[in-house]
Image: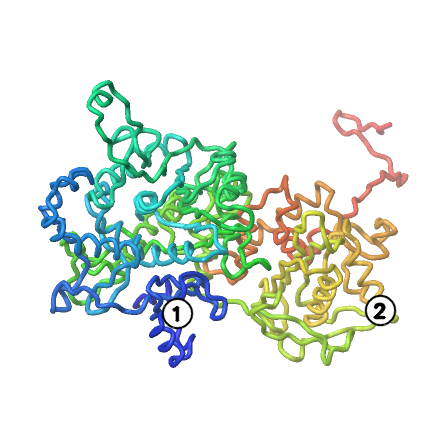
Amino acid sequence: MSYEQTLWKELENVVNPTYLKKQNKLKRWDYGYNEDYDFIVISKTGQIGQIIEIQNLRIALPAVDQPFKRSEKQKEQYWEKQTYPKALSKIKSRFDWDEYPNDFKEEWYDYIDNEFKKRDEGHWFYNNGNPTYITGTHYMYLQWSKIDVGAADYREANRLFFIFWEACKADNRCYGMCYLKNRRSGFSFMSSAELVNQATISSDARFGILSKTGADAKKMFTDKVVPISVNYPFFFKPIQDGMDRPKTELAYRVPASKLTRRKLETNEQLKELQGLDTTIDWKNTGDNSYDGEKLKILAHDESGKWERPDNILNNWRVTKTTLRLGRRIVGKCMMGSTSNALDKGGNNFKKLYYNSDVTKRNRNGQTSSGLYSLFIPMEWNYEGFMDTFGSPVFTKGKNRIYGVDGIEVTIGVIEHWENEVDGLRNDQDSLNEYYRQFPRTEAHAFRDETKDSLFNLTRIYEQIDYNQEMNNTTTQGSFIWENGIKDTKVKFVPNKDGRFKISWVPPKNLQNRVIIKNGIKHPGNDHIGAFGLDSYDISGTVDGKGSNGSLHGLTKFSMEDAPPNHFFLEYICRPQTAEIFFEDVLMAMVFYGMPVLAENNKPRFLYYLKRRGYRGYSMNRPDKVWNKLSPTEKEIGGIPNTSEDIKQAHAAAIESYIEEHVGQLEEGMGDMYHQKTLEDWAGFNINNRTKYDASISSGLAIMACNKNRYVPVAKRQVKSMYLGIKKYDNSGYISKINK
């Protein structure tokens, strides 16, 4: 099966072709965010060409401009670092350059100017017959940055990375990027190269480095940043103060000149030198690193590995302020990392990553974090599986394929990854670590360790992986009253913005089945399934957040046309008002004709049902008989969440369901298709249940469908009764009457 590319896509007809041509002719496309077309222009020529989308971010590339062609033969068209002219390589500084005659300088001015142009505007070259654009930053990384293996390889994944980064820099709404990566993707070197690239053209600026420890930040500075700076050609290298290879700070400024007696006696005139007064340094890891300072660029490496007491979320709240002056964003953060296990810093990074989703913005046009999230699957950037053109070898075809190292690639990266995964199936923690290091999905990247999990993570992750492969296993939508008239019939309407995710719709004859007893409405399908509900009573909270309301629907075995033991509905949301939430839940219950088991410590919803005439839809707690219920429980139903017995029974219900119906089963794969719920189960903590809304409601749904398991059994009392019959002791020769 061929691999389908989904990392980026070209957008067509975004701009009217006639208008596009006119604006290009006049060079009127400004670098930055274009509000009219909702895309970010990264062209610095005033002209745009292809418009692409990377992780929902729309980016306008420059118009094609005389691409460099290495060869006329297509198979010989690829990136190749150009040789530095020998005549210039002998020149180590601008002071040396000044000593050369003018005719020599005139010979090389065009070459130097052209390199500065590529640095600023980017570079076009033919790659496998296609005109290919790389940003100026990417060009500097490939052509002029020395890394551990010498010169960096050209990779298509890195091209898209740098295009995305350029868009982050160009967008005045953005604080930078949050890059979720695989191991050995080159991020540390790429971010180091960008620090040096920007620092050597910026005046009166400061550039910083943070990592998971201070030692790591220092190593990145000394082993990556400094060597890149040292090996720059003289025409890119500003005047530097201090040592050539410093340990703490790289300073591009004029060194202090010592006034000597000889200079005074000879009246020697010194040249007036101008330095950038710009520095690159690193800081120890901590919540308040760089607090109170102003940064142009912060390279934030290994952000997903900040372990307690360090907290990447707390650090970012502080660091964010170093990148702005008032409302103006004046600096950018280049953040990237693989993720640790969730309790080892991974969970905080996960929150930061998902808070950087470009599709979710506030009224200022910014994401919650201010950053833009980017994920590049491992198959796009895995060492040893890149062909000559820098493209990933996803699958091995019929023709021979050679890598950038000249060695034949004999297997596709997808097959290689699957082989590694299969070899780790019996060691779940090692498998999860491999997933985190080399993720093909965001879920892989945030895999947790199994040792602290209450439930069987192996089965949960098997199901998650299966669902991702299947894709589109649920339908998103909304429930509405027919013709807008309440308490009639309910319809389900597919809607990408809907709050419900469903995987089964009952046939027409089972929809909206209501039974009325003594004026009270009862569900007509309680023999088919039931709902579990984790409600809330207050519409708003002080912090504007609050926990979500959560509803789950589950079937049980029946003779009806319904899949048995199947979670068919997931609702995890907090609408603007509690009343909207209540009405959503009520409509779902009416449509499916099933009752709900809800926690009664937040009783507002249960009273809502009673007032509307739906008390019959609210289940009583199954662990008590009617005459043992409290007056409130008799009035509105529900089950408390405070009892330790209930907590244990609730957790046991989920555990049992996972073992019997989730993951790889004897009869095949389970049909639990709701990813949020599976992920909630994976992290569930019985001692801190409040933040696991999906686990609460799904567990209640399981208990509701198996209520007979919790019915109390009355103890039998056996009393001795004298029947008037005498008993004899026959142990001796003569029988005796027992007294």
Indicate the quadrant where residue 638 lies.
bottom right
In screen coordinates, is 493 left or right of 715? left
Task: Say few, some or many: other residues with alpha carbon within 10 Å of mark 1 (under 14 / 14 to 19 / 20 or more).
Answer: some
The secondary element bearing badge 2 is classed as strand
Given residues 562 and 94, the one toward you in this image is: 94
Q: Residue 68 carries which label?
A: none
In screen coordinates, is 291 left or right of 14? right
Given residues 714 and 302, the one toward you in this image is: 302
Reply above or below: 474 against 115. Answer: below
| Residue most extreme to the right | 724
Given residues 69 and 294, the one toward you in this image is: 294
Instruction: Residue at 55% x, 56% y: name it.
Output: 676
Indicate the quadrant where residue 497 lies.
bottom right
Q: Is residue 428 visible?
A: no
- Residue where numbered disc 2 is placed: 520
Residue 243: image location, x then y, percent = 26, 28
The secondary element bearing badge 1 is classed as loop
The mark lying in front, picked from 1 and 2, is 1
Residue 577: image location, x then y, percent = 73, 60
Residue 63: image location, x then y, percent = 31, 69
- Residue where numbered disc 1 is placed: 28
Residue 343: image location, x then y, percent = 51, 39
> Which quadrant: the C terminus?
top right
Cα separation, mark 1 vs mark 2, equals 69 Å
- Amino acid bearing label 2: Ile
Reply above or below: 601 against 41. Answer: above
Instruction: Residue at 9% x, 50% y: name it.
Output: 103
